[in-house]
Image (cartoon, coloured by chain):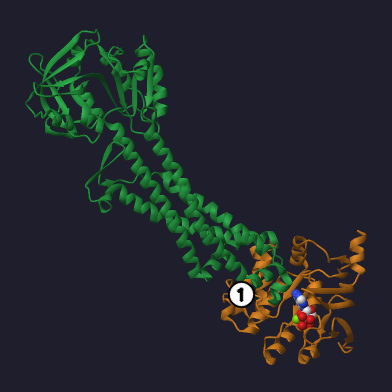
Chain colours: A green, B orange
Amino acid sequence: MIVRLALRNLLRNRWRSVLTSGGVALAVAMMIWTVSFLDGWMGAMVRGSTALDSLQVQIERADYVEEPVIYRSFAMTPQGLERLQGEAGVEAVSARVRLFGLLGDEQRSQVAQILGVDPQLEAQATPVEEAVVQGRWLSEQDIVDGPGEVVLGDRLARQLKAEVGDELVVFLEAADGSLGNDVFEVVGVVRTGTTIIDRQAAYVHLERARYLGALEGQVHEVVIGAADLSQAPALAQRLSPVIEEIVNDQEMAVRPWQEVLPSIAEMVELTGSSNAVMYLIIYLVASLGIMNTQRMSALERRREFGVLMAIGVSPRRLFWIVVLETVVLGVMGALLGVLLGAGLSLYHASAGLDLSIFSPQTSFSYMGVSFDERIYTAVELRTIVEPAVVMVVVSLLCGLWPATQSARVAIAPAISGRS
Amino acid sequence: MSDSAAGEDAPLIEVRDLERIYHQGEVEVRALRGINLKVERGEFTALAGPSGSGKTTLLNMIGCLDDPSSGEVRIEGERVSGMSRTQAAEYRLGHIGFVFQAYNLIPVLTAWENAEFVLLMQGVSREERHAILDPLFERVGLAEYKDRKPHEMSGGQQQRVAVVRALGSRPRIVLADEPTANLDSATSASLLDLMLELNRERGVTFVFSTHDEMVIERARRVIRLDSGRVVADERDEGA
Ligand SMILES: Nc1ncnc2c1ncn2[C@@H]1O[C@H](COP(=O)(O)OP(=O)(O)O)[C@@H](O)[C@H]1O
Ligand SMILES: [Mg+2]
């Protein structure tokens, strides 16, 4: 009966109820959409900045993290990699030798990072193969005789004025202190959008790089691809003992992307706190609306409340009648907001949001990562449920004050219409 | 034990030296200036007096809707003045039915729901609610109007629903503050007749206020108020 009373009272002032719950719905929808947009954007940023280089978890020797010196490598066998690949949460694994050397021809040369990779594993773990803009990705088998294959970052290629088919020479100091040199033929050029790769990377076959750097059986890093970005620290923790078993002669560092790229992690955290501020602002406005509505309707119904109490409704019961009414208003608004917000977010999750309306460029670059013009919202259950639940709680709180006022109404003057 | 024994002997309503002073800023309004009266079970009593004489104030005190400035009200020997709001609400729910001048009914509830509301709060079962209310609706001639909202009924019909609601809670006392004030004289007469008949049939005590002489004629006891004092207390010997 009390619920019926609440519903009927809300229906009585249809317009006001619609307006108020509409406002609530708008707030909830805004919150859902904004959070999923920011989640989507942050996700894209983290994905983008970790996709090619560090990936989500990076394994190196602890002292290599301090200073990346060529001889601070560790032994890694295909069996070891397979073992890592088999761990839960690991999607892809790639082992690399990373050599810093001089790359060029008679006319010009550039400092480059020679990345010795297993072409197949690297292409599985990173989108490097899709980033090829000229030529092709490394072939599965290296040519043993003659020049090796190299795939260059596009800016590096431009600076070297190197094209597919050109030959380049590498010089570097090998792990044993000797001078390593080799000849490579450019088979492809990649444009990844990750600045460091595009400017410096020269992908070659792993064995060739090992030979060049006098690093038989060694690697500098193993990178791990994981689906769940936020779970990377937990994954790193789980992998730590595994890697200790595989590499038992070195002190190893297993770092999630949050540690490898602290500025990006900070950015994500900052977004989280800006969400909280938004909650505060949007919900404050909404709650003022609810409070005002309920206060007004409570004032208008003083006489009715007086009669209710006269016929035996206790002040406490009247209090809950008013609170319930407010909560019903909030719940209706929240449900509507969920429909609206989730609908729009889901649409933008599949269709993407065209950001080129804000900027004339077709793609933009942010923190060393370039995005294409579409951002896809990331819709999670939590993103939808949380704003709705918070709103229901807020509406309950908003009902408390008008309800308290109503329960305190002096019965006799209320009934006789005296104020 | 002794209390209930006292309750049996005590008058149904006993008002002692009742005063009520309203403070309106600097101004003191002495609405009741020492009222003493007793109402016995089954009486049909009118509080008569000009507007401003204190009828509403007195009924509010008896109905535990407001507290006196001094003096007290006892119902069945039990002091009902000075209870907490919650206690008073509980007391009213169990003992007193109200009919007000207007706006008696909750506008969003149907006639039936309005009457049922009190019984729901009393925790009366569905069957019992029907057993109590169906005959009452029948009795007041509104059996066909149960599903109407207040605004779909005439003023007289609304007041009759209020009477049903008041009697439905099976109270000791029904207090009615100018129940006919908004009705034309024919409707007033029939409402009064109805109340009088229910008073006879059910033995429920009615105390109502009015300033309408036609209504006063129908009462078996008339207590006249003026300026917050009882100026006359007449019983119709014939009844
Ligand atoms: N809440 C109040 N505040 C101030 N004065 C009041 C209040 N209620 C009643 N009065 C005054 O008390 C006197 C008695 O009022 P009331 O009991 O309503 O008389 P009646 O019902 O006989 O017309 C009047 O002078 C009225 O103005
Ligand atoms: Mg009055």
| The C terminus of chain B - image quarter | bottom right
State the image coordinates of residue B122 (x, y, percent, origin top left): 70, 63
Q: Quadrant of ligand 1?
A: bottom right
Quickly name the residue at label 1.
Answer: B111
Mark 1 residue CB less than 8 A from any atom of ligand 2: no
State the image coordinates of residue A266 (x, y, percent, origin top left): 41, 36
Q: Which of these two is toward me, A201 or B151? A: A201
Residue B46 falls left or right of residue A32: right
Q: Is residue A88 above or below residue A2?
A: above
Residue type, numbered disc 1: Ala
State the image coordinates of residue A130 (x, y, percent, origin top left): 18, 34
Residue B215 sits in quarter: bottom right
User: Dot 1: what SS?
Assistant: helix
Callout 1 environment at 10 Å: few (<14), some (14 to 19), or many (20+)? many
Residue B36 falls left or right of residue B52: right
Question: Which residue is rendered at x = 32% and y = 38% of the image?
Answer: A45
| The N terminus of chain B - image quarter | bottom right
Q: Which of these two is toward me, B131 or B23? A: B23
Question: Which residue is rendered at x = 41% and y = 50% of the image?
Answer: A32
Residue B6 visible in image: yes
Chain identifier of the residue bearing label 1 in the image = B
State the image coordinates of residue A319 (x, y, percent, origin top left): 65, 60
Residue A415 falls left or right of residue A58: right
Q: Is residue A317 above or below residue A158?
A: below
Residue B207 visible in image: no
Number of callouts in the render?
1
Q: Is residue A206 above or below residue B90?
A: above
Residue B229 falls left or right of residue B206: right
Q: Which of these two is toward me, A414 or B209? A: A414
